[in-house]
Image (cartoon, coloured by chain):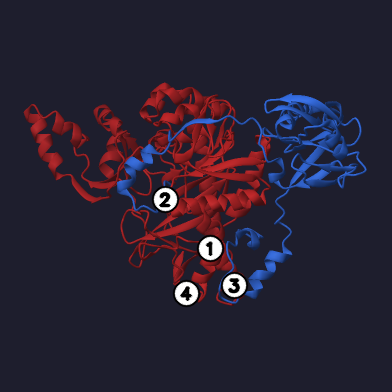
Chain colours: A red, B blue
């Protein structure tokens, strides 16, 4: 895994205009960056990314199966109880999923570590499936890259095939697509999916999330009053489940992509559940529910003490969080294996005072702003992103129809990859 | 190969570049993928439909009934029997009491069904004319007079707009039941970014 500087295609901006890639630059900052690319060996791709991606996905499905019938876990994941039955129904009915993106920290040498699973509304789909593909084709055609250069990116092909499969599953050739207003990027992603759907011979009708209506039969409708029966949404289930129309989104007449059971996987609590079930897996990092840390510490199990004390730095992530919002990197999180929040609240006696002193040693090394966190947090052992030059590099590994479908690389000067990080293409050589 | 073998570039292109990219343009014309028309079948009766689709009796029946109902609303209406028969031929019209009043209307000669094998079939009442004065004699046409071809024809490739009125419409009572969470969180994100992760 190397980062190699390269010449930009001279006409890429006009090409972007031609293909409708309108968010390559945002707020004067480049988002698409082709001044360099990452080079992987085939073995790195196949052994270190492709295989673990598919394996972790299977582990995730195992977790869903465990969670949907377990009220304690559903509660822990802060999923509103009104949706528990529908989630289980959607899982048992095998409602098909279109895609997911697993985010990894990987440096080309040591095992890739799973940072999170974007299972409900992953983005950077267009840039990955189409735009970096086109970059490679053109670089090879113009001699800028060797003819032997390949890319881990069958995303578009697989999306089209899976959309066709989903349409067959629901016996239709028509689907609504929806995203929020005022988001150039999301509308671009939706347009891409519409293009893929058209290739799969599926008709699509667009409606903004805010414009969705409700008719007298309690069906959700588009702006032409058409009932929505199958809908691709780029809007998180955890929002829908907390909004007025959420209750109508789970009736029998309507199916969603991603399906409702994905709300189990798009939850950061998944990280703790994975660790609990597959502790020690080379691609997983130790992770715990914040609410569990105290109990683990009380139990003083060898495992907990090892995890909590060996890992000096922890990353605190809200159960619901997107684009790196509200994430903190903490040092000296626990000392006597006691989380600082609790000890501050319960400082009634001397021991607590002592703990309080210790708690003050806890340092927030890094923090990102954001709106999330009400529903609780998980702690995940800190595993730094590899650095290439000044940049921290994150690998997004895509899944379509249970198969690894390609990768996308995002670079950020910051430790926490956020929504203004840059997208850099890659090759296999 | 670990990447997509083929991508239909003409599908992905959203506008023609101002720069001279004649190579790119060729794709638009070479690709056969721009066909966005539906397959549709024409049936002259419910039996005609179920003969072809024995497993879809429900679809055959519902679309027939809906088409018949639509015909009352959208079908050609005449004040006199003579005018109607002039266009549609002898014994092709009868008096109907519709919600718009009493008119002479041609009989629905068939119905067109699109998206047959789906949860959302599309349908449209169809007419033909037996009048020697009509340019639409022995042709299939829609209520608003669009000629779909010879009366012997049963399978069509049609634009979705042919079906004009869509099935099972009811009016929407309220909107805005989604999106509040995004709005309340939006002060934390640059406005053009979405809810992806």
Residue A140's label in the rendered image is 3
Identify the residue under disc 4. A6
Dot 4: few (<14), some (14–19), or many (≥20) neighbours within 10 Å?
A: few
Work out whether residue B163 can be spotted. Answer: yes
- Residue lying at 72% horizontally and 44% vertically, measured from the top left: B162
Instruction: Work out whether mark 2 precedes mark 3 in sequence or the reverse, and give the earlier one.
Output: 3
Query: As rendered, which of A177 and A383 lies closer to the eye?
Result: A177
Query: Is A313 located above or below residue B3 in the figure?
Result: above
Q: Label 2 lies in what chain? A: A
- Decide which of tag 3 and tag 1 comes sooner along the chain: 1
How far apart marks 3 and 1 lie (CA) works out to 12 Å
Q: Is residue B156 left or right of residue A34?
A: right
Q: Is residue A65 visible?
A: no
Q: Which x, y percent locates residue B155?
A: 83, 43
In this rendering, would B191 be left or right of A126? Answer: left
Q: Secondary structure at mark 1?
A: helix
The quarter holding residue A310 reads top left
Q: Of discs 2 and 3, which sits in the foreground?
A: 2
Measured Cα–Cα span from mark 1 to mark 4: 14 Å
Numbered disc in front, either 2 or 4: 2
> Which is more N-terminal, label 4 or label 2?
4
- Asked whether the residues under marks 3 and 1 belong to the same chain, the reply is yes
Residue A38: x and y, percent? 47, 65
* Residue that numbered label 1 is attached to: A132
Q: Which mark sits nearer the N-terminus, 3 or 4?
A: 4
Pointer 2 residue? A182
Q: Chain of mark 4?
A: A
Query: Picture coordinates of residue A312 (x, y %)?
Result: 25, 46
């Amino acid at each position: 895994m190397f980062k190699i500087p390269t010449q930009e295609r001279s006409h890429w901006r006009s090409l972007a205009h031609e293909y409708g890639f309108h968010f390559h630059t945002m707020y004067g900052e480049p988002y698409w960056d082709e001044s360099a690319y990452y080079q992987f060996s085939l073995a790195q791709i196949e052994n270190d990314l492709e295989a673990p991606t598919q394996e972790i996905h299977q582990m995730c499905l195992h977790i869903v199966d465990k969670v949907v019938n377990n009220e304690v876990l559903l509660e822990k994941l802060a999923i509103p109880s009104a949706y528990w039955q529908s989630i289980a129904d959607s899982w048992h009915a095998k409602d098909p999923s279109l895609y997911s993106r697993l985010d990894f920290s990987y440096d080309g040498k040591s095992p890739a570590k799973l940072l999170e699973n974007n299972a409900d509304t992953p983005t950077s789909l267009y840039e990955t499936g189409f735009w970096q593909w086109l970059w490679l084709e053109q670089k090879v055609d113009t001699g800028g890259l060797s003819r032997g250069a390949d890319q881990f990116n069958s995303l578009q092909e697989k999306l089209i095939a899976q959309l066709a499969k989903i349409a067959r599953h629901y016996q239709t050739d028509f689907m609504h697509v929806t995203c929020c207003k005022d988001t150039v990027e999301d509308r671009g992603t939706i347009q891409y999916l519409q293009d893929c759907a058209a290739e799969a011979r599926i008709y699509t009708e667009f409606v903004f999330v805010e414009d969705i209506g409700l008719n007298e039969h309690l069906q959700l409708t588009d702006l032409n009053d058409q009932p929505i029966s199958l809908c691709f949404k780029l809007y998180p289930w955890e929002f829908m489940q907390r909004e007025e129309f959420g209750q109508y989104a789970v009736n029998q007449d309507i199916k969603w992509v991603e399906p409702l059971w994905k709300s189990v996987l798009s939850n950061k609590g998944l990280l703790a559940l994975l660790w609990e079930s597959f502790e020690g897996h080379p691609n997983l990092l130790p992770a715990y529910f914040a609410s569990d840390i105290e109990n683990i510490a009380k139990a003083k199990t060898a495992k907990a003490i090892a995890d909590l004390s060996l890992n000096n730095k922890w990353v605190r992530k809200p159960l619901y969080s997107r684009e790196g919002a509200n994430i903190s990197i903490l040092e000296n999180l626990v000392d006597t294996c006691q989380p600082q929040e609790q000890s501050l609240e319960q400082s009634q006696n001397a021991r607590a005072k002592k703990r309080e002193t210790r708690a003050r040693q806890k340092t927030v090394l890094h923090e990102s702003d954001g709106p999330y966190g009400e529903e609780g947090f998980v702690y995940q052992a800190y595993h730094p992103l590899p650095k290439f030059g000044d940049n921290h590099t994150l690998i997004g590994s895509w899944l379509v129809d249970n198969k690894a479908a390609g990768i996308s690389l995002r670079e950020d000067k910051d430790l926490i990859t956020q929504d203004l990080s840059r997208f850099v293409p890659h090759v296999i050589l | 190969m670990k990447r997509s073998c083929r991508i239909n570039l003409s599908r992905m292109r959203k506008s023609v570049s101002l720069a001279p990219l004649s190579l790119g343009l060729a794709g638009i014309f070479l690709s056969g993928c721009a066909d966005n028309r539906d397959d549709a079948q024409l049936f002259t009766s419910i039996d005609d439909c179920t003969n072809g689709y024995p497993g879809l009796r429900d679809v055959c029946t519902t679309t027939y009934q809906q088409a018949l109902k639509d015909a009352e609303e959208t079908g050609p209406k005449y004040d006199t029997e003579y005018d109607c028969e002039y266009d549609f031929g002898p014994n092709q019209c009868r008096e109907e009491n519709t919600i718009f009043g009493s008119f002479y209307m041609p009989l629905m000669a068939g119905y067109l069904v699109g998206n047959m094998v789906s949860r959302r079939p599309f349908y449209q009442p169809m007419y033909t004319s037996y009048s020697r004065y009509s340019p639409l004699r022995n042709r299939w046409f829609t209520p608003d007079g669009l000629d779909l071809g010879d009366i012997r024809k049963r399978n069509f490739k049609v634009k979705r707009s042919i079906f004009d009125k869509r099935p099972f419409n009811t009016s929407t009572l309220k909107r805005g039941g989604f999106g509040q969470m995004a709005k309340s969180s939006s002060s934390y994100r640059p406005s053009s970014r979405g809810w992806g992760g």
